[in-house]
Image (cartoon, helix red, strand yellow):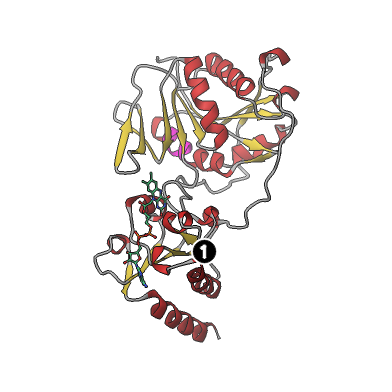
Amino acid sequence: MSDYKDIWVFAEQRDGMIMNVALEILGEARKLADKKGVNVGAVLLGYNIGSLAKELISYGADLVYVVDNPLLLNYTTEGYAKVIADLANEYKPEVILYGATYIGRDLAPRIASKLMTGLTADCTGLDIDENGLLLQTRPAFGGNLMATIKCPDRRPQMSTVRPGVMKKSVKDESRKGQVINYETDIKETDIRTKILNIVKEAKSKVNLEEADIIVSGGRGVGNAEGFKLIKELADVLGGVVGASRATVDAGWISSDHQVGQTGKTVRPKLYIACGISGAIQHLAGMSNSGTIVAINKNPDAPIFKVADYGIVGDLFKVIPALIEELKKVSA
Ligand SMILES: Cc1cc2nc3c(=O)[nH]c(=O)nc-3n(C[C@H](O)[C@H](O)[C@H](O)COP(=O)(O)OP(=O)(O)OC[C@H]3O[C@@H](n4cnc5c(N)ncnc54)[C@H](O)[C@@H]3O)c2cc1C
């Protein structure tokens, strides 16, 4: 067990771009590694992707394991799992972290079973305990229970980490690191999956994760029409429209606006919750916002427990009044 050291991050890239979640986990891995006094390794797989190693170093990696091979051009479960398991067997990391993207969620369990080790899915918190073990915290039972899980007897300790929860380090171009080019012996016959075609959906214009201001509507807005008022307030503030799942399920707004446990996790400077009760599954996605304002006609709504400012009232009266005042200020 003592042969195993370092904290690795799977540096998921698509089309030669590192995914944001990989940089977020790199930021967290940096903190954990500093606590343990070990190195952060980034694992970069693909074809013609070597130039990304520098970016990973500037975001906190000490070592970048680059595996550049035409067979790794597109993600395949078998190809990527084989290479990462081989790397782990050779270099023995103590921890490997993956983004809980559809690729990370597919890849990590396959590697865990190859390496016969433990995996915690969809973590929202990571820490190191007094014995140096990784504490992996994740919501369970629909977010009603937070479970903290350890893997004491197997290495590497592995987690997938929910996108949007951890914070990226500040990019530092002057950081130094080492690039390790790893030659894989992977063969075409190792990969049974044949990719015939990759279809890209038009990218959603809703960028909740990066927004500084989010105005969210819940069932209190009444119907699809009610979201016009939410949009108007968001526009006046230069923000983006969010929504509770109840409104998405009702078909009032598209699912790319959904905030919460099964939607996006957001961390804006300002979050305005309008007609949202504050169910635990909604709070799971927004309670780390800088300032939370709640508008709700029920003074006992749980959203007021997390709100920094609360307005008890009918949103159809409160929001137009807010818009009017905001327009005066910006005029
Ligand atoms: C496994 C699981 C995952 C889930 N994931 C998510 C998720 O990702 N995101 C999410 O949001 N939910 C999620 N939910 C659903 C969640 O439990 C709640 O049902 C949902 O968040 C409720 O949405 P809401 O607050 O809009 O509606 P309600 O709970 O119905 O609240 C509406 C609120 O509007 C107020 N109101 C009504 N009219 C007005 C008015 N005119 N002016 C002001 N206030 C008014 C009411 O007082 C009330 O507080 C999940 C549930 C489960 C079981």
Query: Regarding mark 1 in the picture, which secondary structure is present there?
Result: strand
Point out residue 185 in the picture as x, y percentages from the top left corner.
69, 13
* Camera-side residue of 181 and 314: 314
- Report whether 59 appears left or right of 279: right
- Report whether 63 appears left or right of 307: right
Point out residue 59 in the picture as x, y percentages from the top left corner.
57, 42
Question: Dividing the image into 4 quarters, which one contains the C terminus?
Answer: bottom right
What's the residue at 46%, 59% (across, down)? 243
Taking 233 as reference, is 6 above or below it? above
Question: Dividing the image into 4 quarters, which one contains the N terminus?
Answer: top left
Q: Quadrant of residue 272?
A: bottom left
Q: Quadrant of residue 74?
A: top right
Residue stretch in magenta: 28-34
* Camera-side residue of 157 and 218: 218
* Camera-side residue of 23 and 137: 137
Taking 155 as reference, is 262 above or below it? below
Q: Which residue is mark 1?
A: 241
Majority secondary structure of the magenta segment? helix
Determine if the magenta segment contains residue 177.
no
- Report whether 99 appears left or right of 300: right
What's the residue at 48%, 63% (across, down)? 214
What's the residue at 40%, 41% (across, down)? 124
* Camera-side residue of 53 and 162: 162
